[in-house]
Amino acid sequence: MKVVSFINEKGGTCKTTFAVNFAAYYALKRNKKVLLIDMDSQGHSGKSLGVRVHEVENTIYDLMTNTRLSVEKTIAPTAYENLDLLCANKKLSYLPEELSGKTDRNLRLYKIIKKVKNLGYDYIFIDSPPSAGLVTSNILVASTDVVVPVALTYLALDGCAEVAGSIRHTRETIKEAECKLGMVVPTLYRKTKLANEIVKKLSEYFPDRLSKTILGYNVKIDEAQSFGQTIWEYDAKGKGSLMLEALAVELYNKVLRK
């Protein structure tokens, strides 16, 4: 089973946009059973699906700190057929303190996903926080593949290199880790000289991993999230949905079917 995480240690790169909309795409349009795990204490994945995350009693934080808690009972269905959610909220920000000193602190999510594998999911998608640290380390250990959304700004290449370095370091230092770089996706594209130069550099650094589709800035994608909807219901035939569907197909070809 593929466990795909969306990671960039910088904010505003479209991690949540991809995690939520790709999860919904495969659940709704490809009839796959998908679990979305929100690992960001802001709870944006849940909010993007219309969930009142601050009211959720048991979250991914509770699973990671209480090993006796039932994974199956903590997973919640969403309003979308075939799509389930492990929610996050502000409690997750206390995870490093709570797990401090635990010898398996980097393996908590890995152990949860081992249990999830018995529940019949086709894919697991993980949304990540915009920072390095214990949460991101857990994500890397638990993932089979990492997708890096790269906003086309001045520090874009730096952020992408940091994630690639974190993948290598995790594989070298934690024996359970098998994560690899699955796809690099340029995002928030505007037709400028700088953006075009960054895309060219990315193609040189990641010739086999760079997506052919570039996600341009699209207001409908932002609007959909603000209404707690995916792009597939908010603007199913618009430019934003066409770009995201093209990327979802690339994700399958580069990562999911292998």
Image (tube, rainbow, N blue to C red):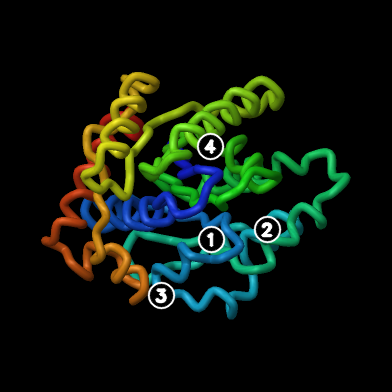
Q: Is residue 224 left or right of residue 88?
A: left
Cβ–Cβ below 8 Å for labels 4 and 3? no
Q: Check disc 3 and give the amino acid type.
A: Gly
Residue carrying label 1: 86
Q: Is residue 1 in view?
A: no
Mark 3 or mark 2: which is in front? 3
Identified at 64% across, 28% down, the residue is: 170
Q: Which amino acid type is marked by label 2?
A: Leu
Please say whether residue 217 is visible from this viewpoint: yes
Which residue position is annotated with label 2?
63
Q: What is the CA distance from the residue labelled 1 to the residue labelled 4? A: 15 Å
Helix, strand or loop status at disc 4 = loop
Q: Position of residue 9 (x, y in %)?
A: 55, 44
Density class for disc 3 (Cα within 10 Å; few <14, some 14-19, many ≥20) is some
Pick whichever of labels 1 and 4 is earlier in the sequence.
1
Q: Is residue 140 above or below residue 77?
A: above
Mark number displayed over residue 50: 3
Q: Which of pointers 2 and 4 lies earlier in the amino acid sequence?
A: 2
Number of the label disc, if any, that sits on residue 143: 4
Q: CA distance from mark 4 to mark 3?
A: 26 Å
